[in-house]
Image (cartoon, rainbow, N blue to C red):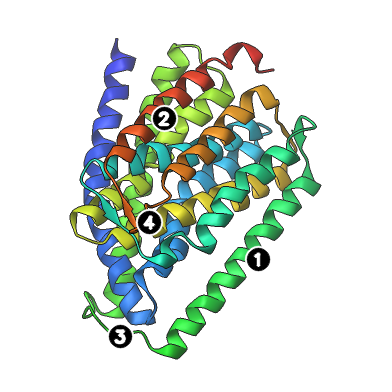
Amino acid sequence: MSIIVSDFTAIGAAVLLAAVGGEAFLKAILSAATHLRVSRALIASTLAAFATSSPELTVSATAAIAGQPEIGLGDALGSNVVNIALVFGLALLLGPIATKPGDFGRDFRLALAAPALTLILCIDGSLDRLDAAVLLAAFTLWLTLSLRAGMKERAEGLPDTDPPVLSPLPTLLIGLAGLGALIMAGHLFVAGAQGMAASWGLNTYVIGAIVVALGTSLPELVTVILARLRGHDDVGVGTLMGSNIFNGLAIVGMAGSIHPIVTPLASVAPTLVVGSLALLMLKPRAGGLIPPSRGLMLLGLYVSALLAMLGSLGRMP
């Protein structure tokens, strides 16, 4: 009983810490976009997305070095399902999201192509170092194109619609402090949830795809919800798109380059397919609006994903 109580205490502390850290991190994102003279969406899909995906990076690298890369794979792929199906689903319950033409351009297409590429590479039952190199090359190409887009925006001189929230040094310090709080919140959530999952007898991939993925996606969840409440939907959309690309290409590629990963299709395919379906559900209507009804559909898809992953328990090595 004491173990269960301590687990719930850790989860409660994680939620409180995430709220404080998320507010600081969002303020830093908005201020950084102004100082760098680029759009908030670009900052969100690159710097913010990379930062909020740092827990997945830590988990995947640590697990791969320890010879258990399946945990990292489950975390990265499971986090993508959490990001879109759960996080975006919850965000849409707060009201419709009006998108701009660029919000679902190159980043959306690559986020949609990444699961298909991963599935193809996993057909032989493993993701070796050559497969990992392919994923990392795709990520490098995307990052290069994003940096070029940022340089173009700076050259064109975006209109300053928002005054700087903070001066440069406080922006950096508050951003790091907020991110640190979000990461610590993720670790506390993982510690609490992992303890309960282990007592239920879940295996390593399922623990990674469900339990760890929830904890490491806490930064995205808090950032996106707060962005919606503050009227910055472009930050929320950009963060989720960039985070999915970072998880699916860079983190899976990094884990596979450290240690080859066993990837039974019966276990990996449901996560990849559900992640792709969730992305397709985000496609805006003709007028650029994503209605709240999509949120209910996404949450239903997330529940289906959980059942599919739990159904793979008996098929894992």
Q: Nearer the viewer, mark 3 or mark 4?
A: 4
Do we see residue 79 in this rendering? no
Q: Which residue is mark 4?
A: 286
User: Of callouts 3 and 1, which one flags the residue occurring earlier in the amino acid sequence?
Assistant: 1
The amino acid pointed to by label 3 is: Pro
**Three-letter code, disc 1:** Leu
Give the Cα separation between the discs numbered 3 and 1.
28 Å
For disc 2, the marked residue is: 302
Determine the CA span between mark 3 and mark 2.
39 Å
Where, by quadrant of the figure, is residue 32 drawn? bottom left
Q: Nearer the viewer, residue 314 or 161?
A: 161
- Which residue is labeled 1 in the image? 141
Query: What secondary structure is marked by label 3?
Result: loop
Which residue in the protein does label 3 denote?
Answer: 159
Q: Looking at the image, is mark 1 or mark 2 earlier in the sequence?
A: 1
Q: Is residue 209 left or right of residue 214?
A: right
Q: Secondary structure at mark 2?
A: helix
Mark 4 or 1, which is nearer the eye? 4
- Indicate left or right for 239 with 160 as reference: right
Q: Quadrant of the C terminus?
A: top right
Q: Which mark is residue 277?
A: none
The amino acid type found where label 2 is placed reads Tyr
Q: Quadrant of residue 147?
A: bottom right
Sequence order check: which comes first, mark 3 or mark 4? 3
For the point 61% across and 53% down, the residue is 250
The image shows residue 101 at horizontal and vertical percentages of 41, 66
Residue at the image position 26 percent from the left and 18 percent from the top? 5
Horizontal side, residue 74 vs residue 174: left or right: right
Which quarter of the figure has residue 138?
Answer: bottom right
Q: Amino acid at mark 4?
A: Ala
